Amino acid sequence: MFDRVRVVLVNTSHPGNIGGAARAMKNMGLTRLVLVDPERYPDPNAQARASGADDVLAGAQVVATLEEAIADCTLVMGTSARDRRIPWPVVDPREAASKVLDQLEVLDSAEIALVFGREDSGLTSEELQRCQFHVHIPSNPEFSSLNLGAAVQVLAYELRMAYLQRQGQPTKMHKLETTNRQNEIPATAEDLERYFTHLEQVLMEIGFLDPAKPRQLMPRLRRLYGRVQINQVEMNILRGILTETQKAIGVQASGERRR
Ligand code: SAH
């Protein structure tokens, strides 16, 4: 789904981080990886950290310079853990994702690069100046630098979230419980009336509601229950509690005294 977005890793020293980045990308649906002059690559450590994302690694393009990596790009976002001397438009990963999607939507020929720097020194000022935006992950200012793979993960995640939201696709896994239809169906007005009648009766039986002085108890309880949409399973539970309460105090569910 992000075939026009590439992740560019500049001069990476640890092959494990290349693998970690590939994995983070594949988890979020990104596939295009470009490696600018990696120190050690290919390397078994990259393979090992990629886990199942070997295809992303195998498809990685290796180039000599950042210029080559971004030559055909219409939008280049550079990531940086630090403030640089020259002020530049800075966005957080969420804003960055929104800009990326905006361009993908309006421009058929969009080619977008997310550029990540060296583990020890990040991107140089010259490299950052080749980017239209700087993306800063708002980390702890006293410990601001994330692991390279982790930084790729944050950006890729925001991109995926923004994409899912724009597509109107769910961003949450459905809980297993909702596979039970009764949990999805709200109780009907009739169910609720039957419940309130039963509740009122039990409240009188246990001496909580005095019919001579009802003190707006039932309207208040109706308002309380009205704030949550009770489903059919929950309705059955509530009715069951009333029935068991009546048994415990020696009253038949019909309302007759047992003893
Ligand atoms: N000491 C370097 C840290 C490099 S961390 C520096 O100060 O720039 C390696 C790479 O991970 C960075 O070049 C950047 O691409 C990314 N990264 C790490 N922390 C980040 C942060 N808080 N915001 C944005 N990118 C970050």
Image (cartoon, grey):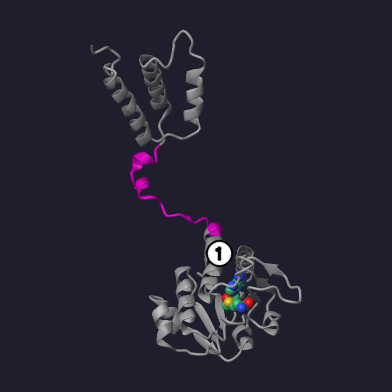
Residue drawn at x 39%, y 21% is 199
Q: Answer yes or no: disc 1 within 8 Å of ligand 1.
A: no
Q: Is residue 88 magenta?
A: no
Where 7 falls versus 201 (above or below)?
below
Residue in the image at 36% along x and 17% along y? 206
- Residue 249 lies, with reference to residue 183, above or below; the image says above
Q: Quadrant of ligand 1?
A: bottom right
**Residue 258 image offset from top left, x and y in percent:** 23, 13
* Magenta stretch contains residue 177: yes
Residue 64: quarter of image = bottom right
Please determine whether, in this image, residue 146 is positioned above or below residue 170: below
Q: Is residue 129 left or right of residue 100?
A: right
Q: Which residue is mark 1?
A: 158
Left or right: 75, with 24 as reference point: right
Dividing the picture into quarters, in which one does residue 11 lie?
A: bottom right
Q: Is residue 199 left or right of residue 12?
A: left
Question: What residue is drawn where x is 70% and y is 73%?
Answer: 83
What span is colored magenta in the figure? Answer: 165-185
The single residue placed furthest to the left in the displayed view is 259
The answer to whether residue 140 is seen in the rendering is: yes
Q: Secondary structure at mark 1?
A: helix
Residue 210: x, y in percent? 44, 11
x then y, percent, for residue 5: 56, 74
